[in-house]
Image: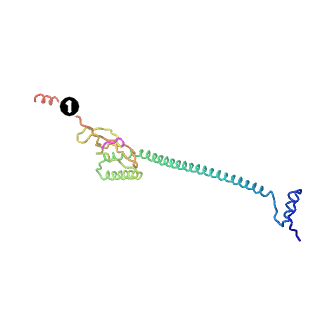
Amino acid sequence: MMSDSPAQINFNESGSEVTEQVAAQTGDTATINPDNSFAATEKTEVDRAALAELTQQIESLKTQLEERSTQYMRIAADFENYRKRTSKEKEDLELQVKRNTILELLPVVDNFERARSHLKPQSDGEMTMHKSYQGVYKQLVDSLKRLGVSPMRPEGEEFDPNLHEAVMREPTDEHPEGRVLEELVRGYYLGDRVLRHAMVKVAAPKEDSPATPEDQSSSANS
């Protein structure tokens, strides 16, 4: 029969032996470890340190990602600007080549037009030659039209230095000063740009003619 007297604890024994005796006398099978609280505290500190390090790594990666994104956007913008610039330079170069080529052909067109204004076919042979000539001229003009070339029509317009080049001035009182009276050398557009200025004759104010001696005598007698 088991005694109901309080458990006897020997304080001279080691802590582990005391624990074993208490557990045996009370029938408690749980193991009491005085180091459990310290170990749990130490584990918590390790977890906190690991979490702090992980958080720091995440923030560092986010910063790197933002920097890479900004760098990528800058490179993309630079490339787009480069693409637009090279495309514009290519278009300008192609236009300049076309312009120079057409300018070389315009004197040929001028000669065709001068010859057309002077030719007066009389016989059937001359008419046949004239028609052949007209066919070549029309083919040349149609080719220029397909390239975007169009002639100016300055007669009767106000003189514009951006479009016209005044090579003659004709005093007249029939037209206001600065009005284009005649196109001497035809001007042309290439698209919406001036390909060649038109050489024109411009109206100038008519000066009063000097009085003759007869006029002066008549004026004095009156």
Residue at 23% across, 40% down: 173
* Prevalent SS, magenta region: loop
Judging by the rendered image, the residue that carries numbered circle 1 is: 210
Labels in figure, total? 1
Q: Secondary structure at mark 1?
A: loop
Indicate whether 211 appears above or below 143.
above
Indicate whether 210 appears above or below 93.
above
Indicate whether 14 appears above or below 158.
below
> Residue 6: x and y, percent?
85, 64
Which quadrant does the C terminus fall into?
Answer: top left
Residue 134 or residue 212, whichever sits in front: 212
**Magenta range:** 158-162
Amino acid on which disc 1 is placed: Pro
> Residue 71: x and y, percent?
59, 49
Q: Residue furthest left?
A: 222
> Residue 109: x and y, percent?
37, 47
> Residue 131: x and y, percent?
34, 53
